[in-house]
Image (cartoon, rainbow, N blue to C red):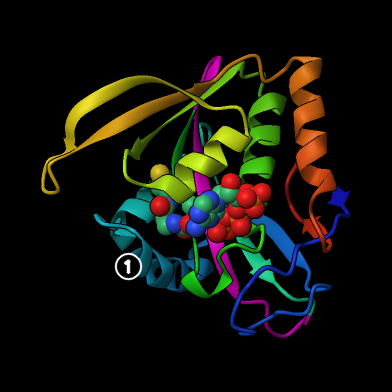
Amino acid sequence: MTVRGALRSRHPDGECGRDPSTEIRIAPMRRRHLRAVLRIENTSVHRPWSLGLFLNELGLKDTRFYVVAKAGSSPVSQPVVGYAGLLVLEADAHLTTISVDERWRRRGVGERLMWVLIHLARSRECEAVTLEVRESNHPAISMYRKFGFEVRGRRKNYYSDLGEDALVMWVTDIRATTYLERLERIEAGFASPTLTEGLEW
Ligand SMILES: CC(C)(COP(=O)(O)OP(=O)(O)OC[C@H]1O[C@@H](n2cnc3c(N)ncnc32)[C@H](O)[C@@H]1OP(=O)(O)O)[C@@H](O)C(=O)NCCC(=O)NCCS
């Protein structure tokens, strides 16, 4: 499936790929991506996953869907600029991880990853998606709200080393027409091409 949209050029400092026509390509995560994934993971997340954990997740092919976002159209080099994962258990899907390279944030990469994973969840006949997020993680919470997630619970001291709770967020009825319309509105806001490769829905 190929999706054409447009990526907003919102990055403040003119670094890498500022050109608004930069393509973002979403593809299944493979072992060869893990070096780049771990580099982003280690600079983005308070308790980073290990290589072994990513490898284990990639091996669970029936229930896990991991994708990377790659930038640019060069056939030689398309750097990995973000990644995300979904655990599918019958009618519910669980967002297990999502991170974007610091240099690529606020340019629509995160929401493209979410957009693709929610389409994947819909195609697997999931009705709802859930996730946990640190309650101080306002950028992520704002993104999740954009996709219709609402806070439905709290895990006390979930991030015990930080003394912080996790908010449990859910979005339901993702197969409803009204939710598809929300996804279409989000897609309409993309400002450069988003391509997918090797993904079926
Ligand atoms: C959360 C994260 C993935 C967002 O990725 P991103 O590519 O920067 O996000 P996008 O540019 O696609 O923005 C999508 C929406 O997220 C929200 N958002 C993203 N960054 C934000 C910020 N700094 N402040 C407020 N809202 C923000 C906005 O609602 C935005 O929509 P808008 O542009 O219409 O305002 C990124 O900040 C990240 O990697 N954080 C570190 C890892 C992490 O916290 N992951 C979540 C774990 S639960």
| Residue 160 locus on image (x, y percent) | 12, 41
Determine the residue located farthest toward the front in the rendered image: 12
| Residue 78 locus on image (x, y percent) | 67, 77
Give the side of residue 51 with respect to residue 122, left or right: left
Some atom of ligand 1 lies within 8 Å of the CB belonging to the residue at label 1: no
Vertical position of residue 8 compared to residue 84: above or below? below
Q: Quadrant of the C terminus?
A: top right
Vertical position of residue 38 compared to residue 98: above or below? below
What residue do we see at 87% from left, 52% from top?
A: 2
What residue do we see at 60% from left, 76% from top?
A: 12
| Residue 94 locus on image (x, y percent) | 46, 30
User: Callout 1: 10 Å neighbours few (<14), some, many (20+)?
Assistant: few
Q: On the image, numbered disc 1 is attached to which residue?
A: 42
- Main SS type for the magenta part? strand
User: Residue 134: which quarter of the image?
Assistant: top left
What residue do we see at 37% from left, 47% from top?
A: 137
Q: Which residues are magenta?
A: 74-93
Q: Nearer the viewer, residue 106 or 53?
A: 106
Q: Nearer the viewer, residue 92 or 56?
A: 92
Which three-letter amino acid code belongs to the residue tagged 1? Asn
* In the image, residue 78 lies in the stretch drawn in magenta: yes
| Residue 23 locus on image (x, y percent) | 78, 69
The secondary element bearing badge 1 is classed as helix
